[in-house]
Image (spheres, rainbow, N blue to C red):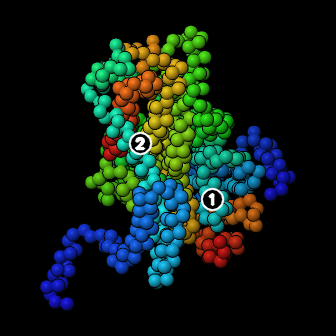
Amino acid sequence: MNKTKVAKVEEDMISMKNVRVPSSPQDVYPNKPGDANVHLETQNLHVWFGKRLILEKVNLAFPENSVTALIGPSGCGKSTFIRVLNRMHEFIPGAALAGRVLYDGQDMYDAVVDPVNIRTKVGMVFQKPNPFPTMSIRDNVLSGLKLAQMKYENPDEIVRTCLERASLWNEVKDRLDASASSLSGGQQQRLCIARSLAVSPKVLLMDEPCSALDPGSTRRIEDTIREISSDMTVVIVTHNMAQAQRVSDYTAFFLSEDGAPAQVIENAKTEEIFKKPKDSRTNDYVNGLFG
Amino acid sequence: MTSLKDAKFEETFKEPQYPWRKRNPATTFTNSIIVILPVTIFALGFFLTEIPGALLFILVFIPVQIVVAIFATIWGISRKQVGDAILSVLSLVAFSFVIALMGSVLFSVFSRGLPAISISFLSQNNTYISPTTELGYGGVGHALIGTLMVVMIGMIISVPLGIASAIYITDMKGRLAGFVRFMVQAMSGVPSIVAGLFILAAFILTDISGFSAFTGGLAYSILMLPTVARTSEEVLKLVPKDLRDAAIALGSSRARVIMKIVLPTARTGILTAVILGVARVIGETAPLLLTTSNTNGTNLNPFVDAVATIPVYIFQFLGSGYPTAINRSWGAAFVLLSTVAILFAIARIVERSTKKG
């Protein structure tokens, strides 16, 4: 990474800072239907760790109640990208970014925005199941509401709905007070999804949620993803091409070539990415020719 | 196989079994020879001759062990098994050494302290008692109360401070984290008498306070703080980052992540940190001589007037040289050890009962 390039990008950022860029889906995401109600998008996003540019010029928009899969080789910044989307990126020492991340038209990195609020609207499910080991299954589902200090009524109803949506209810309905660590890996991951649903986020980010799970649990989580996308926007990072095709409406392909910062090579409807990709690199990747 | 045998075979499945506990008799025999022979020779040499144990260990035990091991290999026992057997003997020797040390400390305190113990010894104070008074009169009641007060005050000050500084280092990752860690480390090297001198100079000689349980507690807290902070820091580091991430992603403020997730997860370890802190100070005598002084009566006010403590009581009577006074000291040592044991047991029980909840 040469310095002049970084400087130039930063310059670009400064010059566009005060200009209101119209967030038309067609501009940034040409393959989207024009009437899609985009409420999360990135504009000219650049991400650094220290002085190293990781992501360059990412313009992605996520239409409401759609599922977008992010694919690409390991280490190309997909996980970093979704951590940017709910302001978890800033916890990594040396992290920096430029560009905008608009949530409902508001730049979520604006000084007036409270990151804690953003994270209740944009939830996240992690690669490794991470239920709270000191809490029961029930308390795990309600933990988000308690941690975010949200008011709620009828906790039993919330626990039941969330567990049902995460297709875990039938397996645990008789032992809601058991410790969360007594569950299997697949069940723990579904519990984590139920926990994220309890705070009713508008967007759910999933970082390879099935990478450590058996096919049965993966199947159930995919069903859950389809189900929750009726009233939630889902962004899922996956290395499983079949999974991307099964669950997503849109797919974005990230690639970093020869140590250069990663870019979005192609993004389109999932069918198009897999059936008739425009870029030869996308074609090679989705057909397993590299990566 | 007959049907009867089949039935018996089926029958065995009904009970839980532990097949891995079975030993190969041949291996057990040879291993026990490898293990027992050198130990026996060493023990004989130790108890029947005047040769010092360390010399015996180097000149007899290790050569015999090596010779036995060589023969064992010649006899066709695999080298891995011999290695295992030797390692287990060496660790057993080290283990017995530690147990013997601890055992002899406990034994001498028990055997010499127990005769002094009675209800009156635990409940009465030291008023009108001289070093030659018989054991039936007077006791450590006042000093026991004093020690508990001083330790409690030390805990009230150092535990919140210690945990807070551990949180600052691990979770807040403040700009001064490295400096705080360095200072805590440096503090753990402060000799106890220096802590006492500091409190003496800062509080007592300046007339802010007289000798009292409170000033003693201040001196103790200086000594406890580094232990509590260092141990808590290690424990907080063990809480997986995943859990913190999960809580943050649910829209939790950082304060709530620490209070609701990090500290509850690390609860057991933090309790250990507190126990280690108490264990660090409870027998310290030097700082108390300078900060609580000593008294013969019972003083229940932690802020006013000198107070007696068990370490100082032991010091006081041991110095007088009379046999009954020395017995009193041993009795007080027994009380101190028991107090520590009881406090630790209570802590463990509390911890276990909260874990299930």
In the rendered structure, the answer to whether residue B225 lies left or right of residue A76 reads left
Tell which residue pokes out farthest to the top in this image.
B207
* Residue marked by disc 2: B105
Crowd class of label 2 (few under 14; some 14 to 19; many from 20; radius 10 Å): few
Does mark 2 fall on the same chain as mark 1?
no
* Residue marked by disc 1: A78
- The foreground one among B308 and B135 is B135
Q: Quadrant of residue A172?
A: bottom left
Position in image of residue A181 (x %, y %): 39, 54
Q: Is residue B53 visible?
A: no
In the rendered structure, the answer to whether residue A147 lies left or right of residue A267 reads left
Closer to viewer: mark 1 or mark 2? 2
Compared with residue A262, is residue B230 higher up or lower down, i.e. above or below?
above
**Element class at badge 2:** helix
How many numbered marks, from 0 up?
2
Residue at the image position 49 percent from the left and 57 percent from the top: B51
**Element class at badge 1:** helix
Compared with residue B314, is residue B39 higher up or lower down, i.e. above or below?
below
- The foreground one among A56 and A93 is A93
Compared with residue B44, is residue A50 higher up or lower down, i.e. above or below?
above
